[in-house]
Image: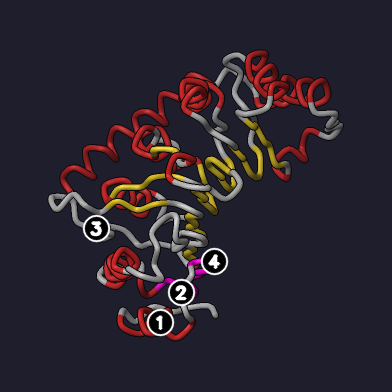
Amino acid sequence: MFTERCKRDEQILEAVKKRLEETYNLPESKCQEVLSALLKKYKGEEIKEFEKFDLFTFRIDFNKEKDMIMFEELGESRVPTVHSLFLSHIKPESYSKVSAFFEHNFPNKLNALIFNFSSRPNDESDLVDLSKFIEEIIFKSVLIVEEIQIWNCKITAADLNLLVTYFAHCKKFHIYWSKFDFSDEKTPLDFRMAFEPAIEEVSFEGCGAAVLNDWANDDSSLNQIMKAFKNSEIKSHIKQVILEDCDLEEDRIREIMETHDIKYAE
């Protein structure tokens, strides 16, 4: 695992270095100017003081026509440093646009990435296959400082291993309303790492719902996740695990957390 991780680390560092070199001659003020004009034109939002961009939440909804027109006009211009980035309502027909955003428009720094922010899924057909974007997401992980949120996705063991290990420097690690598939016996959950992690808050809100992992009747996937945290360097850093809307009784949650010696926020 660590050999593969080291190779990917080198690739990521090279990609980030290349990205920073390519954008070195494009000043942040120019990126702010481009985005500010588009926000005013399509969202009615006006930012007069560009130095406040690092407090701004930028939202792009891939299911809204105006947002898609704005995205087209954005072209290959980089989004400036912002506080939070919401990429919302991702559908199969917008996958290529999402990939283009990661390649050309992703900021060089942000506090939080919220991927596929959406309403509660009705069934698995409403979920995004995270495997299609996992490499693009982790290649941007070093640019994200504080928080990662993944919404409404199908997540394999390989995906979750990558997410946890590459976002362990973030204090908040949240997965919402997602379906886990740990059926590949060749890829067990393994969150061990070669550096000191910083994750303090973990959330799997909604993931236990009946239409997803159905933890009320089978909480084996939750147990596997907690066991992987227990066996990793992250365990001692976790201050709370949030399991709202997971259809689990408090006593059962407490039992699982005590079994794996993980702190739980009631």
**Amino acid type for the residue under numbered disc 2:** Leu
If you read the primary sequence from the N terminus, does the residue marked by circle 2 or circle 3 appear first?
Answer: 3
Q: Residue at x 56, y 45 (%)?
A: 114
Which label was assigned to residue 252? 1
How far, Cα to Cα, is label 3 from label 1?
Answer: 22 Å
Q: Position of residue 176 (x, y in %)?
A: 51, 54
**Amino acid type for the residue under numbered disc 4:** Asp
**Amino acid type for the residue under numbered disc 3:** Leu
Which label was assigned to residue 245? 4
If you read the primary sequence from the N terminus, does the residue marked by circle 4 or circle 1 appear first?
Answer: 4
Q: Which residue in the structure is indicated by mark 3?
A: 189
Q: Is residue 92 magenta?
A: no
How far, Cα to Cα, is label 3 from label 4?
Answer: 24 Å
Determine the residue located farthest toward the left in the rendered image: 186
If you read the primary sequence from the N terminus, does the residue marked by circle 3 or circle 1 appear first?
Answer: 3
Q: Position of residue 141 (x, y in %)?
A: 44, 42
Closest to the observer: 117 or 169? Answer: 117
How far, Cα to Cα, is label 1 from label 2?
Answer: 7 Å
If you read the primary sequence from the N terminus, does the residue marked by circle 3 or circle 4 appear first?
Answer: 3
The answer to whether the residue labelled 1 contacts the one labelled 2, judged by CB atoms less than 8 Å apart, is: yes
Q: Residue at x 53, y 78 (%)?
A: 265
How far, Cα to Cα, is label 2 from label 3?
Answer: 22 Å
Name the secondary structure under disc 2.
loop
Q: Quadrant of residue 238?
A: bottom left
Q: Which residue in the structure is indicated by mark 2?
A: 248
Query: Callout 1: 10 Å neighbours few (<14), some, many (20+)?
Result: few
Q: Position of residue 139 (x, y in %)?
A: 39, 35
Please report the bounds of the magenta region as a residue range.
237-246
